[in-house]
Image (cartoon, rainbow, N blue to C red):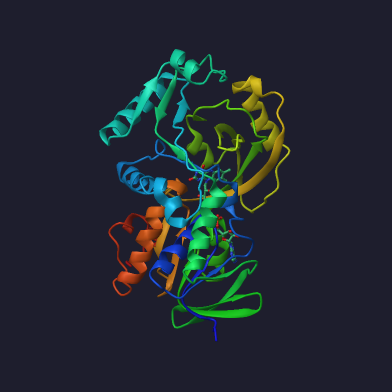
Amino acid sequence: MKTNNYDIIIIGAGFAGCALAYQFSKENVETLLIESGGICSGTSSACAGRAQIIESETDEYLKIVLAGFSKLPDLGKELEIDLEWETPGHLTLLFSDQELFKFKQITSKLNSYGINAEIIGSDLLQKLEPFLHANNSKGAAYSIEGHLNPFKFCLGYLNAARKNGVDIKLHSKVTNFQINNQKVIGVFANGELFSSQIVILATGAWTGSLSRILNCELPLSFTKAEAMVSQPLPKILSHHIGISGFYEAVHGQDKRVTLGIGQHRNGCLVISNAIQPASIIDRSSSAWGMPSISNQLQKFFPVLNPINILRTWSAPSPFSKDSLPIIGWMPHYDNLYIATAFHLAIPTIPIFTEEIMHHILESPEKKHSEFLKPFFPNRFYAHNER
Ligand SMILES: Cc1cc2nc3c(=O)[nH]c(=O)nc-3n(C[C@H](O)[C@H](O)[C@H](O)COP(=O)(O)OP(=O)(O)OC[C@H]3O[C@@H](n4cnc5c(N)ncnc54)[C@H](O)[C@@H]3O)c2cc1C
């Protein structure tokens, strides 16, 4: 008879939780995945599906992005799902000499890692993207980039995990924890208690409120990010297109609208992003956000006036104080692990979740990992060395 005892409980069925469930399932670890909503109903449901390379800020992070990116073309085969993986490449539009200078450095750094990237002039830009209206631009920075269907990314990991024996509880909100002797020994959801050796919070922007129940304050912020998807259209875009400063806006503290646009295999355009600071999670589309994105879209693509918008949405976009993911053992407990605030999630999740699985299974006593060290939560808690 199945009991409520597990080796590992993962809370949160977004990209991180589903991919982690899959990694542990491959090692035959008794795993339970608990999710308060449906599969991929948190921030992962808001994702534009980009597997970005050019937005890797440091050499160290770029190496992780490239290692994860290299796994994506074959991931669908491994998970037995069509991820709708394509590699349209990315064009970052540049409007000032400073941006041009900055992206010349970035593209030559990418070249030094063997990545195809270059600055292209405005004439070539116009040829590559004839529907783009960017007359005042200084050209664009091109780099390799991929995209996939984010729902299938989640579902692929989840189904593969389920096939390997992971138990999955959807619509089961974790509301409290059972603690004994510095250990989180159980979680309460829907009136049931589930016990486990190790608990992982893969709860994205919700990790702050859950860790508060556990009396640990996690320095996690989030913005409210809004986006929309159009009706299927004939091919009008060959690349993903974004404006320089997109990520500064996403992690910023100002109300801003920026533009990221890509056309997926089904012909739909995914158009983002209106961003505003947020202190509570509010999933409604705002009266400010949608017209702002729409105005931006019409400015750069007048040909798209009018188009039908099929769906608009909003999600919390979580980030840590230093914009790096928070991954590792929480110093406050002996068996509580955090995996949140992913930056460039799609290209890094395949590699981070594999490393997390090794970190947890291979060194439970030492609790150390050179690879994950820069992301350990203890960087925010000076009093604890672990
Ligand atoms: C508009 C937008 C566009 C984006 N575009 C891209 C992109 O193109 N490429 C990219 O790489 N990244 C993109 N991102 C970021 C990316 O979507 C996130 O980094 C990623 O989805 C985070 O996944 P996660 O699993 O950590 O969090 P989530 O997907 O938020 O998963 C956390 C889960 O935990 C569940 N949960 C919370 N509390 C509880 C509880 N008490 N009990 C049980 N379950 C709970 C939630 O319901 C949720 O499903 C975008 C983000 C936004 C907002």
Q: Quadrant of the N terminus?
A: bottom right
The furthest residue to the left: 112
**Residue lying farthest to the bottom in this orientation:** 1
Image-based side of 99 in relation to 251, left or right: left
Q: Quadrant location of the C terminus? A: bottom left
Rendered view: 333 above or below 47: below
Is 77 situated above or below 29?
A: above
What residue is rendered at 30% in x and 28% in y? 108
User: Along the line of sight, which residue is nearer the eye, 221 or 56?
Assistant: 56
Could you say which quadrant of the image residue 20 lies in? Answer: bottom left
Residue 384 seen from this side: no
Residue at 44 percent across and 83 percent down: it is: 181
Locate residue 73, reporting x and y percent: 41, 45
Drawn side of residue 375 relative to residue 43, left or right: left
The residue depicted at 38 percent of the width and 45 percent of the height is: 69
Residue 53: image quadrant is top left
Whole-percent x, y for residue 301 in the image? 61, 22
Task: Choose between 162 and 207: the one closer to the eye.
Answer: 162
x%, y% of residue 88? 46, 33
User: How many numbered marks, from 0 up?
Assistant: 0
Q: Residue at x 54, y 45 (%)?
A: 149
> Is residue 39 left or right of 340 when viewed as pictured?
right
Whether 22 is drawn above or below 264: the answer is below
Q: Is residue 20 in view?
A: yes
